[in-house]
Amino acid sequence: MPSESEPDRRRGRPARRRRTGKPSAGLPAGKRLHSTMYLLRLIREISKGPQAGRGPASSRVLLRYMAHEPRPLIYPPGGIGLIWSAKSACTTAVLWYLGRAGLLEEALRYHSWPHRYRMDILPNLEAYRHWLQTADLTALRWVRVIRDPQARAVSSYRHALRFGYENEKIERRTGLAVAERGFSFDEFLDYLLKIDVRKCNLHHRQQWYPLEKRLKRVQVVNVDKEPLLDTLYAFADPGPEARALLASEMARIAKVHHASRTLVEADCSSVVFQQPATNGQWPDNEAFLNAGTRAKIARIYAKDFSAYAPYL
């Protein structure tokens, strides 16, 4: 979310209240179902009550969008909401949100990977449920964090190669034995051209989210053009203590999860990389982007390019 919740090869229930430093695959099926079923019940209740149809957009329709990953996050006491996408600096955005909502310390006590708290705990908090039930979502100020689709596509490729969560699907669609052989960026794009990027894994799903067309006040932030934290602090400052804690967490996460990039003059778009290559020096984005791959990305993420054209 779930991303940028890193996929994990482990199975079973996630560790609780441990600072493992290891990201995990996501909420166990039972808890995911519980949270989703609650939101669906809430949708039905609101559609019958006086809140239905409040404002220019139906609360029922808005809540339906809120029930699906990547779930937007709201903090009505501060009058704000966050729309995020995996592989678009989402961990930074989620940490900022938790800081502004006064939940950052609690979230980090629960697990060192903030997406665990976002998935496991936040949807089940009584206060959060109350916000969903009573807030006029169209009255909030929203920040929408995006990334240039071309840079994001390269990041999504490295992520899929590193964690292998899409291997079986890629093999079925392309016939390539990617688990043993690896796959190139160009082959990854060919796979994305064959699937519905509106409904696929969050780490390579299109960024544009249907909720956006229902909202009045949305500030779009392109992380490839603006300093994200400075922009988020200007949008809604979480305060000095949260800023200090957030800075510490960002430094820790960067050491573990961010790629160490190196300038490469050669075209790497057709190079078949294997999983171990993702753990060391990694070619910079431009090494993967040429006329052919840019054209494919434009086709795959046409909606993102059109929706966010002023910000790219």
Image (cartoon, rainbow, N blue to C red):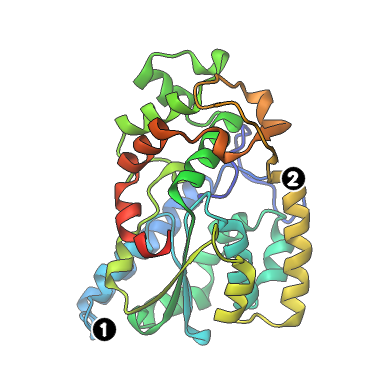
Q: CA distance from mark 1 to mark 2?
A: 45 Å
Residue 230 or residue 33, whichever sits in front: 230
- Give the residue type at disc 2: Val
Residue 129 vs 180, above or below: the answer is below
What is the secondary structure assignment of the residue under circle 2?
Answer: helix
User: Which residue corresponds to the image point at 55% horizontal and 80% vertical from the top-left?
Assistant: 235
**Is residue 43 shown to the viewer in this render?**
no
Residue 237 vs 154, above or below: the answer is below
Q: Nearer the viewer, mark 1 or mark 2?
A: 2
> Could you tell me residue 203's position as x and y percent?
48, 44
Q: Quadrant of residue 138?
A: bottom left
Mark 2, residue position:
256
Contact, mark 1 vs mark 2 (Cβ under 8 Å) = no
> Could you tell me residue 236's position as x and y percent?
57, 81
Q: Is residue 133 left or right of residue 246?
A: left
Residue 278 or residue 222, whichever sits in front: 222
